[in-house]
Image (cartoon, rainbow, N blue to C red):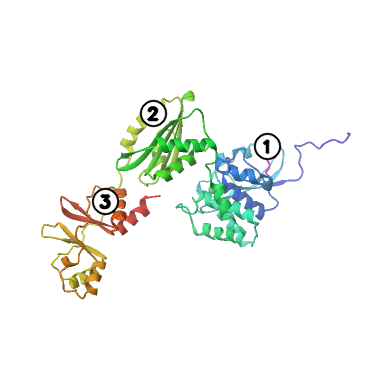
Amino acid sequence: MDCIDPPKSVQSIPMNIAFGHSNMDIDCLGSLLLVKKLFPDYRLVKSNLIHPAARKLYTLYQDYFDFLNPEELQGERIDHIIIVDTCTAHRVKEYFNHIKHSDPMIRIMDHHNLESCDILGAAVEGGPYGATVSYLGKLAMTQGIALRPEEATIALAGIYADTGRLTYENVCRADYEVAAYLLDMGASLRLVKSFLENIIEDDQILILNQLLLVASTSNIQGHRILLSYLELEDQVEGLAPVVEKVMDVENPDAYFAFFFIPKKKTLLLIARSRRARIDLHELLYVYGGGGHQAAAAVTLKHQDGPGFYTQFLAYLEGSLKPAIRAKDIMTRNVHTIRDNLSLLDAALFLESKDLTGVPVVNDQGKVSGFLSLRDIMKGRKAAQMHSPVKAYMTKNVVVSEGHLTMREVERIFYKHHIAHLPIVEEGRLVGVVTQWDYLQYKKASAQ
Ligand SMILES: [Mn+2]
């Protein structure tokens, strides 16, 4: 052969490329798919690391995406770049390491803290969406782009993955709008669900079973804390979803899962919290780890596993903010009535105060009953509105004390089917926790 290949470093046709962050996740893949539809002249570049949660989807669709490796950018002239799902320079370093002799225009589409973007010269767009897919999905909707069912499925998986199936606090209206558009395009919820299933390996299932056996709960500062300590022969991938599964089963306020690999003297602590008061990032930051309030982890080398476990428990005991208790959320200055009041006067009183029920107290301030609208209704039906309250009130009222944790309050509500829980101190009424108080607490404090 006498023809000579042109030197690789002098590519005359400039390229447009798009990529997501290193360790590509499902939102990344979904976003890149939409880039492919919206900007057909862009080539997609893959990260050399795929997040474990996205591997299934990536493996099934790698032909569809037709990714370039970052190394293949070497020597190419790049004119335009679209970066999705990150605006942080160190998360796209693996691509820029190979981009030389180019001065590309960079467009970023993201849903993370956009104002803290440190990729210089880039034009940033997006906003506080639950997923980057939702931003790109809005663009696709505006342009009337049609998707095939498989494409819609991948995109929807991105929204579901980043929003905890549309339940996290980051969810906004656009996430639902784009989800609806993707359903119209034939997205399969059954497939989405299977892509999100991330406990698939045998060793993950084995560890799940072991954790369920060894995990135990402790009461620390009024919180129900789940703890487990497990020694592993070697590193296991995908432990976080296993820990989350145990969390779902046991439903504690927070879970601290310790994994120790003796031969490497390495300790991995994975933590999850369901209470705003338990800030895991703050707790693990002290050990050089972190994440966010509800999910954090730390890896420690040169450790004595059992020793660290004991030491960490003492640290938790001293650092956890006390749990919220009935006295913290109860309504104080409660209205009360006496049992010799007529039902009619009691009804007028409830109406004037806009109440659905009221504790009945005696001369000593002790709770002797509870009168609800339902009790009054019974009196009205029997044409007994001039009867005294004591004839129709609920006697044997369930009362509690202020130190009860919210978990205990919850249990009482459900067990006794009541909507008001009078709180007494030394027998005297000091407040009431209503279902409304309880729901406000749930909204503010629980995940
Ligand atoms: Mn994302």
Q: CA distance from mark 2 to mark 1?
A: 42 Å
Mark positioned earlier in the residue sequence (2 or 3): 2
Query: Is residue 189 found left or right of 262 in the rendered image?
Result: right
Q: Residue furthest bottom?
A: 383
Secondary structure beneath dot 2 equals: helix
**Residue 291 visible in this rendered orientation of the protein:** no
> Which residue is pictured at 69% across the width and 40% down the height?
73
| Residue holding disc 1 | 71
Residue numbers of the magenta segment: 67-74
Secondary structure beneath dot 3 equals: helix
| Residue holding disc 2 | 308
Query: Is residue 353 found left or right of 297 in the rendered image?
Result: left
Point out residue 40 in the picture as x, y percentages from the top left corner.
69, 53
Residue placed most toward the observer, 51 or 420: 420
What is the total number of numbered labels drawn onto the structure image? 3
Please, what is the three-letter code of the amino acid marked with disc 3?
Ala
Question: Does the magenta portion include 61?
Answer: no
Mark positioned earlier in the residue sequence (3 or 1): 1
Q: Nearer the viewer, mark 2 or mark 1?
A: 2
Q: CA distance from mark 3 to mark 1?
A: 60 Å
Q: CA distance from mark 2 to mark 3?
A: 34 Å
Residue placed most toward the observer, 66 or 149: 149
| Residue holding disc 3 | 326
Secondary structure beneath dot 1 equals: helix
Residue placed most toward the observer, 211 or 438: 211
